[in-house]
Image: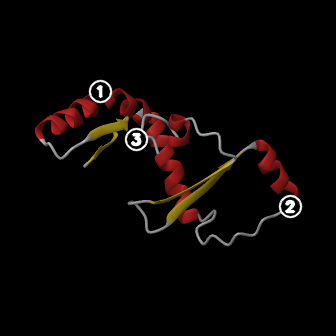
Amino acid sequence: MGQDGQVVLRRSLGCKAGYSGYCQGHHFCLRSAGLCATTKVIADYFEENYFAHGHTYEAHPMTLGPAVATIEEMERLNLVERAASLEPYVRTKLEALKAKHPSIGDVRGMGLSGLWSL
């Protein structure tokens, strides 16, 4: 979250799906965090029709507390904007690797998320 220069990668990719799931194992605790993002129409349906899904990490305070603190620190330190501003640096380094190694066919990325194809 944030390494691509956007708060949510779906925003970077322009996705219009009605539902998106996300699960992240945090390095600072032993619990995983999960979220579900959807459209208002779908969310409104579940206001009246409860869906029992059984995620073991759903709304667990050991996950939510650190997750909220992490998001607050990301906002305080402007880390998402920083990731976006560093994209040209990462791109330059990836392009240098491509020029040096003939096995690299393509380089691409967003923010601090970069990759190459072999």
In the rendered structure, the answer to whether residue 15 lies left or right of residue 2 reads right
Q: What is the CA distance from the residue labelled 2 to the residue labelled 3? A: 35 Å
Q: Position of residue 6 (x, y in %)?
A: 48, 35
Asked if residue 57 shows in the view, the reply is: yes
Q: Which residue is mark 2?
A: 49
Q: Which residue is mark 3?
A: 3
Query: Cβ–Cβ below 8 Å for labels 1 and 3?
Result: no
Q: Give 43 or 66, whichever is nearer the viewer.
A: 43
Between disc 2 and disc 1, whose residue precedes? 2
Q: What is the CA distance from the residue labelled 1 to the residue labelled 3? A: 14 Å
Amino acid type at mark 2? Asn
Q: Residue at x 25, y 42 (%)?
A: 105
Element under label 3? loop
In the rendered structure, the answer to whether residue 107 lies left or right of residue 65 reads left
- Which numbered marker is on residue 88? 1
Element under label 2? loop
Between disc 1 and disc 3, whose residue precedes? 3
Amino acid type at mark 3? Gln
Query: Cβ–Cβ below 8 Å for labels 2 and 3?
Result: no
Q: Residue at x 14, y 42 (%)?
A: 102
Q: What is the CA distance from the residue labelled 2 to the residue labelled 1? A: 47 Å
Query: Cβ–Cβ below 8 Å for labels 2 and 1?
Result: no
Q: Residue at x 27, y 32 (%)?
A: 91
Q: Position of residue 70 (x, y in %)?
A: 46, 48
Above/below status of 48 relative to 88: below
Q: Residue at x 60, y 65 (%)?
A: 60
